[in-house]
Amino acid sequence: MTVAIVLFTADLRVHDHPPLRAALSSSDEVVPLFVHDAAIEAAGFAAPNRRAFLSDCLTDLDEALRDRGGRLVVRSGSTTEEVCRVAGEVDAHEVHMAAGVSRFALLREARLRQALASAGRRLRVHDAVTTVLPPGEVTPAGRDHFAVFTPYFRRWSQVFPRSPLAAPGAVRVPSDVASEDLLSRRSVTGVSEGLATGGETEGRKRVTAWWRACLAAYEDRHDDLAGDATSRLSPHLHFGTLSPAELVHRARKAGGAGAEAFVRQLCWRDFHHQVLAARPTAAVADYRPQHDRWRSGRAASQEIAAWKEGRTGYPVVDAAMRQLSHEGWMHNRGRLLAASFLTKTLYVDWRIGARHFLDLLVDGDIANNQLNWQWMAGTGTDSRPNRVLNPVLQGKRYDPDGAYVRRWVPELDGIAGAAVHEPWKLPAPERARYDYPDPVVSLAEGRDRFQRARGRAD
Ligand SMILES: Cc1cc2nc3c(=O)[nH]c(=O)nc-3n(C[C@H](O)[C@H](O)[C@H](O)COP(=O)(O)OP(=O)(O)OC[C@H]3O[C@@H](n4cnc5c(N)ncnc54)[C@H](O)[C@@H]3O)c2cc1C
């Protein structure tokens, strides 16, 4: 009787799961294992919103495995120690897992490989489980990764991803492996009120519903803040309850401008993953240093606090920040505006904003978060690093009727139409009726300071 372990990490699903399928075909029994790694908690990465969503994902995965005659085994501690412990208990000959890209994931993989080898066991790492193409699959001549999105997209689009795998019909798990109780969502405190539900079942339902209602119009509507017509699949992609390769296959099959635009966004995700895999330091260090001397001190701290609270006096920025704290999620256009405002208008270090996002985002992800922050701060892969987004013009363009602002900044509810983006322009007696702050800084002052700091205009 041969036994293999499938170590689930950011791939909490049974559909299109190469490690699970490979383990089932090479062994008589399989232990589907998830380890709550103490190092993730110690690094402050186990934010309440993601823990709550994770709890849903694990419960759903356990149910999916039970439907197939198996179950999920959960342990806590160091991943290496716990995997080796379970491997010893069941005498597993091999362990299957998905490849990761962060420094943490690469170290975890290396340590595990070594520890298993010293006990005569093998680690099999599967590519293209959490990304469409593995990082490094397409590279420019003589370099280890693409630093610019468009040429990456061109090459990426020419490679057809592997075919999606069906969910297994049966999973046989050895009967005598002990498991901890599943993490209960109720036990997690500090969760955003409007947090979405996690799990593969929920993710697949969301794909079906969104596909039907919004995919065709995605290209036209993805920037419409109030329309809220993007897929909201990012937390599912972060936890791997959906397979990005399967989504690309489905979208290409559906065809049309909306599907193509959606595939392009999925490519952005792969793009950031291949940058991080090649430059793990980009999680914390400037990818393209601009020699910034970011603001600090009392005034900056007060402005950072106002930004976090959604009280900068710029309604669309504040609406986005309030959406983040209420839902643990923010519309992409909101993320761009909030990040531009912090790093350029306030000239505050992108790491402060990225940390705040990671504390709240349910899809908070090192590759996508840190590199999008760097993109917006102009220290990343943007070819126009000094562009500054004007929150008033952007608000009028992407929330022309002001509905997004009124939804999230209810104290401005009484201002009709696009005027809600500039409450300071209201006649004084009317302005006085709204308990809403004046802008923390004028846009012109912020832009001039930024341009002086960077030594040029864009
Ligand atoms: C400052 C900032 C921080 C961000 N932090 C994160 C993060 O921590 N985690 C995260 O998943 N995304 C992050 N993004 C990217 C993007 O905002 C979200 O992926 C998107 O808003 C999620 O909503 P959606 O699923 O409805 O996206 P859709 O528009 O439906 O797009 C489909 C999928 O494509 C991917 N995608 C879309 N845009 C991007 C992008 N710019 N970069 C990488 N992947 C993308 C996502 O996986 C998304 O789910 C960030 C963007 C910015 C500007």
Image: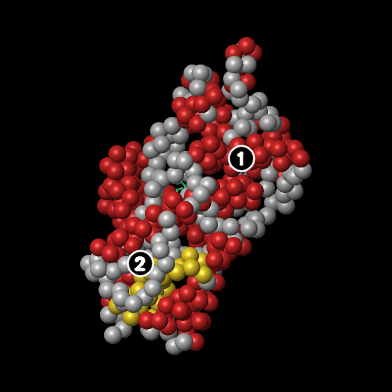
Quarter of the image containing the N terminus? bottom left
User: Which quadrant holds residue 226?
Assistant: top left
Per the image, label 2 sits on a secondary structure element best described as loop
**Which residue shows up at 52% across the image and 19% down it?**
415
Please state the horizontal and vertical placement of residue 297, each as a whole percent of the image: 77, 43
Please state the horizontal and vertical placement of residue 31, each as a whole percent of the image: 35, 74
Neighbourhood count class around disc 1 (C-alpha, 10 Å): few under 14, some 14–19, many 20 upward: many
Please state the horizontal and vertical placement of residue 349, each as a whole percent of the image: 67, 48
Residue under numbered circle 1: 308
Separation (CA) of disc 2 from disc 1: 38 Å
Q: Which mark is residue 72?
A: 2
- Viewer-proximal residue among 377 and 255: 377
Q: Is residue 434 above or below residue 405?
A: above
Neighbourhood count class around disc 2 (C-alpha, 10 Å): few under 14, some 14–19, many 20 upward: many
Of callouts 2 and 1, which one flags the residue occurring earlier in the amino acid sequence?
2
- Viewer-proximal residue among 87 and 214: 87
- Any atom of ligand 1 within 8 Å of the CB at mark 2? no
Residue type at tag 2: Leu
**Which residue shows up at 69% across the image and 31% down it?**
441
Q: Is residue 318 above or below residue 7?
A: above
Quarter of the image containing the C terminus? top right
| In the displayed structure image, the side of residue 129 where residue 313 appears, left or right | right
| In the displayed structure image, the side of residue 112 where residue 31 appears, left or right | left
Q: Is residue 372 visible?
A: no
Q: Is residue 250 visible?
A: yes
| In the displayed structure image, the side of residue 338 where residue 211 appears, left or right | left
**Which residue shows up at 76% across the image and 40% down it?**
298
Q: Which mark is residue 189?
A: none
Residue type at tag 1: Lys
